[in-house]
Amino acid sequence: MKTLQTAIQHVRENNDFIINLLKEFAAIPSISTLSEHEADIQTCAEWVVQRLEKSGFENIQILPTAKHPSVYADYLHAPGKPTVLLYGHFDVQPVDPIDEWESDPFAPEQRGDNLYARGASDMKGQVLASLMALSALHHEGGGIPLNVKVLIEGEEEIGSPNLGTLMEEHKELLACDVALNPDAGIISATQPSVTYGLRGLAYFELWVHGAKSDLHSGLYGGAVHNPAQVLADLIAGMHDSEGRITLPGYYDKVRTLPDEEREALAKLPLSQAEFMRNAANPPALFGEQGYSFIEQTGARPTLEINGLYSGFIGEGAKTVLPAKAMAKISMRLVPYQDPDLVQQQLTDYLNANAPDTVTWELKPIGHGAPAVLVDRHTKPVQAISAALEETFGVEPVFKLEGGSIPVVGLMQEILGVQSVITGFGLPDDGIHGPNEKVHLPTFFKGIETLMHFFVNMAQ
Amino acid sequence: MKTLQTAIQHVRENNDFIINLLKEFAAIPSISTLSEHEADIQTCAEWVVQRLEKSGFENIQILPTAKHPSVYADYLHAPGKPTVLLYGHFDVQPVDPIDEWESDPFAPEQRGDNLYARGASDMKGQVLASLMALSALHHEGGGIPLNVKVLIEGEEEIGSPNLGTLMEEHKELLACDVALNPDAGIISATQPSVTYGLRGLAYFELWVHGAKSDLHSGLYGGAVHNPAQVLADLIAGMHDSEGRITLPGYYDKVRTLPDEEREALAKLPLSQAEFMRNAANPPALFGEQGYSFIEQTGARPTLEINGLYSGFIGEGAKTVLPAKAMAKISMRLVPYQDPDLVQQQLTDYLNANAPDTVTWELKPIGHGAPAVLVDRHTKPVQAISAALEETFGVEPVFKLEGGSIPVVGLMQEILGVQSVITGFGLPDDGIHGPNEKVHLPTFFKGIETLMHFFVNMAQ
């Protein structure tokens, strides 16, 4: 008889097959932010379609948007049972700095227990784990015991600019009881965790313009304000010496952490030494005074410089006084900050502080996303908690995630559903950086956990 | 009979031929700072050799150095007359930002009175003007009336790193009474000027390192100090709110401008409106308080950001917390600042101000050069003044040049000779920036001025 156990057994006996599928999936350079990869996005969407077909799904569609498409499919054979909407994304981050990769980011390479590739962890590994769990239940577990809809998008890494519109357009199609979002991670390979909060995001490009073209720094240096200098001055002023953000009103709406939550966070089994190792060993930690590193990365907002560009950055010397300078600036938001409001606060700051020797321009990149806070006492959260304990043999802890998953807010807003945030990335996976990897034993535990979750949710 | 006048007449009748030569010369992409252009540097050196051969020069040699070669030649047929060493450089600056050029920087294009090309003004135009002056005197002027040695180098735009060694090695060969350096400019097409001072240069790359690799700004942002933020903080602190440089001891050795010099500079026929036009119209001027824009660019030192780089600078969003950040920082020095001392002052500043959450590295790029101050009352300076007045019909004014010509200091130090600093670039030539051009009528006046100069020097 086919049961959850036979499905689990089947996955255990077919690890190599599944690893090869992950290699195939991760080899597609589906970088959503670079327009030259548009065809790869399409190829990747088609790859997902093929996997869904082989997993017993029906009604499979590539839904176009103004930019990159999403893939939809469903499996609705359990009348009376809840409907779970599985969310994922098949797009990935760019790969620069490319020279720091030890292997080609799009030629997945297994070294020891890890598979190295862009997207291996964020989140092709998670998408495939979810599809493999569903496929195993369908083929070897007696069928998926509840109703499942799948929405895998191609724009997450650029801030899901068209997902809201798509969800509005397909509100009926996407109707569900709860969303499952496996785009997060656990604390360690031996300590599962449930994410109950996510930070939001607001992302901008700030351009400072001086003269209309680059100038000779000898002929004009001293009398023309250097836009790179002005940009540095403006950035420097955005934090005070205690690591607090100086934008006017920035902390007004920030959620104060309740004492009991601070106490629980303080007990998370993550030492500072381990955190520093995961963070690629900076010389020392630094953050807003008065908060632990766990609070600083999960419960407090940031303003981060993601990129800087001005003038000549090639080899050697060029004595140029640049015409312009650019910074990519993003903010991680916590409850109850508002992306539009922080944009206004940044604008106010620039209006107050930019000198009249330059002009400036602030361009929002993508849509902002507010932070998310999940109720830990609902059935879906209990179902994932139990699934984690069943698979890992350890009770999960509850944590806050510093990253942003804008779709969680959209699902709440448009579909009116909460999300179960899970996923099996590890803190040292190096997502968004060079040498991204997935820990294969944890990846396989992820497949088993998700099978347990679907079964738990059907009960 | 062949005289100065027949030589001048000959040049006037052969403008098109000379413009075509300049196009040929400027079409060679001899960018010294980019290693992929090494072969172009060689091609360019050979082009100069060919011109020298056709101008009656002898003993023509390509002198190798540790990097790019120099070209030497001489014309020694006037025993008892002074020997002038003509200095020039055939290398050019890089061309970025390439998308701001209206025509290909290495496909010289004549538009109206101007010829647009990288190096058209700095300084292939000046080198060719000098060689054309000598060629005309040799072929059509009854011979060059004094002794001339020529040294055209290929490393000026990278700070002439090997020129000192080369001059030491060939001290005898290069022995002369005075150097002629036409790597400067005049105030306007109708107002000739003599440059009596140059600023020096010290150029650095400053690297700030945080974590060992790029991090996800969501997972680590808030607890890991962002190197781009630290770099901005450090740069911001290098100037005070009055535009003064804060490096410890920076102004200690700076020459105080005598009142009579300030008065003379105040009378230079360059309006602020004209300066702003030449400076590609920044929204407003900005510089050290208490000094005019002429003083700020000629007589006061600077600290300039020539380039900024960190993290992701491509299209769109990448939520990276960068591992490192870089600034190209150069200082224009005035008498009697010392390049090694300002490097020490910058190091002291960084030691005092860089936080221990990052590491940093300061790399000097090229050799520093001290500033230059020329005695206006010597024969060579009088010879060029007279030549300018004879050609332009207007008495030249004396000005300070904000740019740097390191070779002037080397010639003083190694060969024990002063330099006559001249040249026919105009303030709006756009040297080092996009759309560099040379004003052809002024270029031809330059040829005539140099012919007068050689004749004046022989008298």
Image: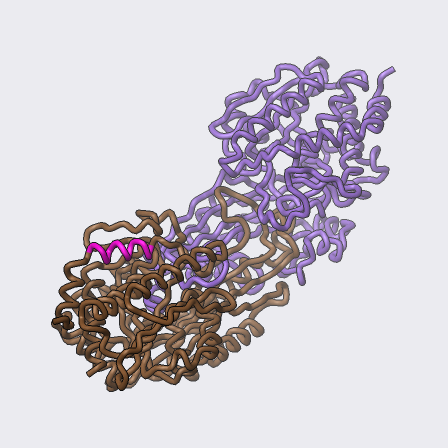
Chain colours: A brown, B purple
Q: Residue at x 60, y 67 (%)?
A: A355
Region of the chain picked out in magenta, as a range: A16-26
Where, by quadrant of the figure, is residue A427 drawn?
Answer: bottom left
Image coordinates of residue A344 in percent, x first then y, are 53, 77
Q: In this view, does A229 lie to the left or right of B220?
A: right
A386, above or below B298, in the image: below
Q: Please say whether residue A291 is visible from this viewpoint.
A: no
Image location of residue B243, percent across then percent down: 57, 60
Q: Is residue A358 magenta?
A: no
Q: Does the magenta stretch include residue A19?
A: yes
Residue in the picture at 78% in, 21% down: B137
Q: In which quarter of the image is the C terminus of chain B?
A: top right
Could you say which quadrant of the image residue A28 lies in?
A: bottom left
Residue displayed at 22% across by 81% down:
A458
Closer to the camera in the image, A392 or B297: A392
Q: Name the residue rendered at 84%, 33% in the picture.
A: B390
For residue B50, above or below residue B268: above
**x and y, in percent, of residue A202 in the image:** 45, 72
Quadrant in the rendering for residue A180: bottom left
Q: Which of A271 and B398 is in front in this view?
A: A271
* Of A96 and B120, the residue lying toward us: A96
